[in-house]
Image (cartoon, rainbow, N blue to C red):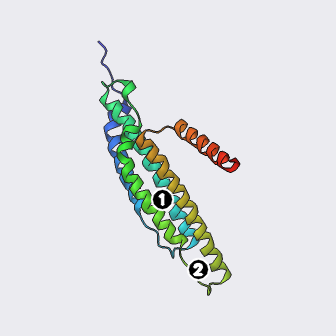
Amino acid sequence: MKTKRKSYYKETLPDLVAKLKTMLENSLEVVSKNIDPATKENELKAALESRKLAVEDVIWSAKEIGRMKFELGGDEEKDAFSDLTYLTKVIPRLIKELKGMVDNNLDIVDKTISKKLKESGMKSALVSRRLAAEHAVWASKKVDELEKILIGESEDDSKDETVIMNWTKRKAKLG
């Protein structure tokens, strides 16, 4: 008589889910952390990149948690599963943190550059503002993307919307 061996992966799933939830929470803390507008260029770049990476980690880990929780459940229908189920629970908080991130980045963009700075300091301040602006744009677009996921709008829907908007703009220019 053969004994059925449970896979190591299945045995570790509960622990994996718990650790991913911790990772998700830690990543959300990184996203919510404000950056001092006076931060130097290299430190600012690292801080902005780490927050962007943290956003991606939140999304990835939320999808993985959803998938793993489904695997743990086992009896539900596969058709009813979506890796977005856990993500949709996390999205409202992530959107809130992203909006705070945008506001913080805009504070950096808005900082006044002292005319007393030497050329190297001037360059550093200008680069810092540009980086913060780029990350504010990225985070703003990520908010829109997450809101679409939350309301169930697919990428195809948004492509159709863009085509219609572009057609409307062309029509307005011609008319």
> Residue 159's mark?
none
Q: Provide residue 159's location: percent of width, then percent of height.
A: 57, 40
Q: Provide residue 153's location: percent of width, then percent of height.
A: 47, 39
Disc with the residue nearer the chain's start (1 vs 2):
1
Which residue shows up at 38% across the image and 30% down it?
81
Which residue reaches farthest bottom?
116
SS for callout 2: loop
For label 1, the residue is 51
Image quadrant in which you'd find residue 164: top right
Taking depth in this image into account, of 1 and 40 the one nearest to the observer is: 40
Count up the numbered dots.
2
Image quadrant in which you'd find residue 8: top left
* Residue 132 visible to an observer of this rendering: yes
Q: CA distance from mark 1 to mark 2?
A: 24 Å
Drawn side of residue 67 relative to residue 154, left or right:
left
Drawn side of residue 137 relative to residue 103, left or right:
right
Q: Provide residue 103's location: percent of width, then percent of height.
A: 46, 65
For label 2, the residue is 113
Camera-near label (1 vs 2) is: 2
Q: Which amino acid lies under the numbered mark 1 shown in the image of this protein?
A: Arg
Taking depth in this image into account, of 86 and 46 the one nearest to the observer is: 86
Q: Provide residue 130's location: percent of width, then percent of height.
A: 60, 67
Which residue reaches farthest top?
1
Which residue shows up at 54% across the image and 41% down it?
158
Q: Which amino acid lies under the numbered mark 2 shown in the image of this protein?
A: Ile
